[in-house]
Image (cartoon, rainbow, N blue to C red):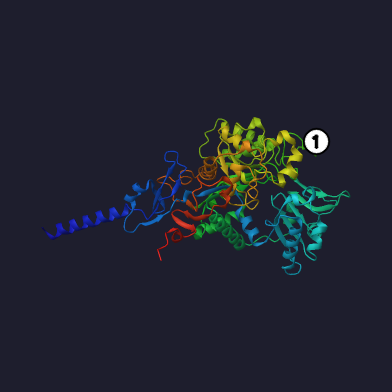
Amino acid sequence: MRPSTLLLLATALACSACQSRAQFADLVFTGGKVITMDSANATAQAVAIRAGRIVYVGTDAGADQWIGTATRVIPLGGRTVLPGFEDAHVHPIGAGFNMAGCDLTEYPTRPAVLARVRTCADSLPAGEWLVGSNWALPLFPEANPQREWLDSLTPGRPAFLRAADGHSAWVNTEALARAGITAKTPDPINGRIERNQKGEPTGTLRESAIDLVQSQITEPTPEQRRTALKRAVVELNRVGVTAFHEASAGRADLEAYRELDQRGELTARVLVSMLAEPTLGLEQVDSLVAWRKEFQGPHVFPMAVKIFADGVIEARTAAMLAPYLDKQDDAGTPNWPAARLDSLVAKLVDNDFSVHVHAIGDGAVRMTLDAMEAAERGKTRGTRRHQIAHLEVIDSADVPRFASLGVIANFQALWGFPDSYIRDLTLPALGPERSRWLYPIGSVAKAGGRLAFGSDWPVSSPMPLLAIQVAMTRQDPADPAGATLLPEQAIDLQTALRAYTLGSAYALGIESETGSLTVGKAADLVVLAEDIGRVSPTHLGKVLVQLTMLEGRPVYGDLATLEPKPAP
């Protein structure tokens, strides 16, 4: 045989070996409870990953063909594998700042809040602003804390504490003075300055009135904003989130996302909703179109626009169809008159934006559905994914419209139990008939509506499993033997998991890439410490996330911790 023939034969054999090696997976999970969210292959035992993508989902025996000498094999011992959770409504940058500031989340009583505020104030240099967050509205009479209480805790400095829901703020006398707020200051558009019987500001600000004081606080630097975002994304990865919807972003936020993405430090996929300002006209859409092009990146998709249709029930700023029982002839005023909302949504649709609307009251929900219906009439929907977030009250006549209009019902399922917000601030305002439609997740699902779940963190916990627990039980996760809120609105485990995975992926417009464990999709997945199909629903929130992977690489946890320990 000639040397040239031998060379050709050797090359062919080498290439054949290379090709064979290329067919093996980099990583194979075996022996798991794999919940795929893929209707064609609902459950499996094994998942194989190569070059960041899923190449096999099926039985352990079938996975053998993907295992070569360089393949890492992780036996799961019955642990659950899921698609990565996708949070359809979250505020990571605000959450990141809260984590590093005077966060009042873990202080459930008024004395505990006051003590924490004093500690925060005492730790600051003289005269510096005290900025904090997440005090609970029900801790104060009529959700209206007084400036004098804050004055005694923060002498010699201005103080600004945003409420947990983000729609109220508690400020002291010095902060009011710096903002020039007096008894003569009129309420701003879409805002309210709470006042005492003499007409003087009490220290509680609602909605856009918050900006009167917040505008006096120095804006964070770009580096501080990026640091806050990184801090929050690390926490989201820790609870199993691999993609999320930034629910309200301005230009500075977009710059933070772009910078982290370009540095390779953004360990999640992000749909961004850019905020539409009620004080601006339709001309703002042109700027949003420009931002969409400017800031899109490998993991950042500014394809949606956020609209605040109303406020919240606790502050009586949510727009209802009928008046509040404790506010004579006052049903709450929407942030956008119907005609302006219709015009804005229509122009956004004409520019191929998905529209993401905050709507709490049944009046705001109906206005939004009407606007979306009119804007899409006669059009091909394409990739636009319109959604309404929060949905605390939906009139029964509007429940089937989510399915018929193709509007996504974006629920924060963790809110659906009878806490003090519901008992003390909501039920008395709505009465028994309207209260039958609080967070009607089950009704929307039964009517065929698409569900997506989000946390609204930092308003509430970012833990998907905790929200899924409440979606199934409608009970306080801290009191599983306690009262339920409309148990007929509970949903089953598969429906809840789907809402936090493939349902949210659809809402983010990335369902072809993620949301299910399907061959060809990115290996975005989460490994849980237990088989969640076997645990009680009241235990779900305690199940640990052991590993979160984005594109086949760990972004939380370590593969080594899942491997069996060698015998001593």
Q: Position of residue 218 (x, y in %)?
A: 70, 61
Q: Residue furthest bottom?
A: 125
Q: Quadrant of residue 471?
A: top right
Q: Quadrant of residue 403?
A: top right
In this image, 131 relative to 235: left or right? right
In this image, 173 relative to 286: left or right? right
Q: Position of residue 252 (x, y in %)?
A: 61, 56
Q: Position of residue 195 (x, y in %)?
A: 83, 49
Q: Amino acid at mark 1?
A: Asp
Q: Vertically, is 117 above or below 52?
A: below
Q: Vertically, is 158 above or below 397?
A: below
Residue at image location 46% in from the left, 51% down from the top: 79
Q: Residue furthest left?
A: 1
Which residue is denoted by mark 1 in the rendering?
329
Q: Quadrant of residue 565?
A: bottom left
Q: Quadrant of the C terminus?
A: bottom left
In this image, 241 relative to 121: left or right? left
Considering depth in this image, is 272 or 476 the residue closer to the camera?
Answer: 476
Q: Residue furthest right?
A: 198
